[in-house]
Image: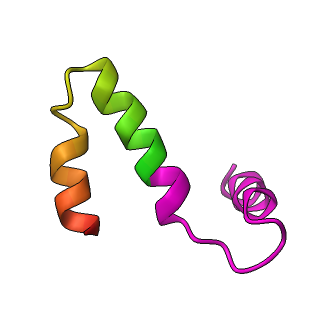
Amino acid sequence: SLEAHRTYLASLGGGGPVDVRTPLTGLFRATGERFGGRLSIPFELVVG
């Protein structure tokens, strides 16, 4: 659920302000490496 996901993100951030980009960028990087880097490149260009 969305609420559980929010709680999970908050726990990643140590209860402070959650920087969504860091776990997302890591996730997309891992996914991109699995698929030859094709998915991570556009995402990183958008996020900067």
Looking at the magenta stretch, what is its main secondary structure? Answer: helix
**Vertical placement of residue 23 versus 36, above or below:** below
Q: Against 29, is 18 above or below?
A: below
Residues in magenta, as a range? 1-24
Residue 23 in the image: x percent, y percent? 54, 52
Image coordinates for residue 44, horizontal then vertical, percent: 25, 56
Task: Compare residues 32 and 9 and report the one nearer the observer.
Answer: 32
| Colouring rule applied to residues | rainbow
> Across the whole image, how many numbered discs are drawn on residues?
0
Q: Is residue 11 left or right of residue 45?
A: right
Vertically, is 41 above or below 2? above
**How far from the left and from the top, in percent, is residue 32?**
29, 31
Indicate left or right for 11 with 28 as reference.
right
Query: Residue at coordinates 15% horizontally, 51% vertically from top-left?
Result: 42
* Image quarter of residue 38: top left
Q: Is residue 24 left or right of residue 14?
A: left
For the C terminus, the image quarter is bottom left
Quarter of the image where one finds residue 34: top left
**Residue 45: which quarter of the image?**
bottom left
**Which residue is depicted at the point 54% across and 65% down?**
20
Q: Is residue 7 left or right of residue 31?
A: right
Please tell me whether residue 9 belongs to the stretch shown in magenta: yes
Residue visible at 81% across and 58% down in the picture: 11
Residue 3 position in % (x across, y down): 74, 60
Q: Is residue 34 above or below residue 3?
A: above
- Residue 5 shown in magenta: yes
